[in-house]
Image (cartoon, rainbow, N blue to C red):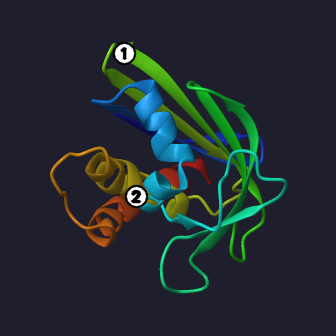
Amino acid sequence: MTDELRAEGADRVVHLERAYDATPDELWTAWTDPERLARWLGTPAGPLLGASGLVRISMGDDPDQTVEVAVVTADRPRLLEFSWSFAGVAGSRLRVELVPVTADRTRVVIDHGGLGTSTTGYGAGWQAFLDGRLPEALGAPAADTWDELFERALPVWRERAAALA
């Protein structure tokens, strides 16, 4: 497990790595199949792959809990890159790399950049999704709730942001 906040000039990049007991194809499907994506990240308004424009993903009941994404790169089963526009926040970019560790274990590497200084919520949010919701969608026993994981992670991401300021 690796969690870092990196500075790239004035830009900030949230970097996380996790290994899962799943093949790259299983994780690819978790990221790209609308039904599977809805189990852990949010409900997309349609398919992400092949969409001609932005696809809205609802991540909760609140209308502010939506993101508009477009697939920029899709190299199955190893790389996805998205444009990412969360409600009320300037657009950013999300890179998801799926790296085989063994035949049935894969490391997910996330780099979410273009965030400016609004990194703490992104870091804590991705950590909560990757540590709780994604493993559950892959069949692991239920962990703490997303909110509990987020609240525990937030102070650490705030410290990382303060260290870069």
- Pinpoint residue 142: horizontal percent, then vertical percent: 18, 57
Residue 159 seen by the camera? no
Residue at image coords 29%, 55%: 132
Above or below, 117 relative to 16: below
Which residue does the numbered mark 2 point to in the structure image? 40
Q: How far apart are marks 1 and 2 (CA)?
A: 22 Å
Secondary structure of the residue carrying numbered label 2: loop
What's the residue at 56%, 45% (across, down)? 32
Residue at point 83% right, 57% down? 53
| Closer mark to the observer between disc 1 and disc 2 | 2
Q: Is residue 98 visible?
A: yes
Which quadrant of the figure contains the C terminus?
bottom right
Looking at the rendered structure, the kind of residue marked 1 is Val
85 versus 97 height, above or below: below
Horizontal side of residue 105 vs 140, given as left or right: right
Residue 152 sits in which quadrant?
bottom left
Mark 2 Cα shell of 10 Å, populated few (<14), some (14-19), many (≥20): many
Q: What element carries label 1?
A: strand
Residue 98, position as x, y percentages in the image? 50, 27
Instruction: Tell me: 136 left or right of 119.
Output: left
- x and y, in percent, of residue 129 in the image: 40, 55
Q: Depth check: give the residue in front, 30 or 5.
A: 30
Residue under numbered circle 1: 101
| Residue 117 located left or right of residue 143 | right
Query: Which quarter of the picture shows residue 49?
Result: top right
Q: As rendered, which of 136 and 151 lies closer to the eye?
A: 136
Q: Which amino acid does label 2 sit on?
A: Trp
Write down the quadrant of residue 13 in the picture: top right
Residue at figure coordinates x 48%, y 21% from the top left: 99
Farthest-out residue, right = 52
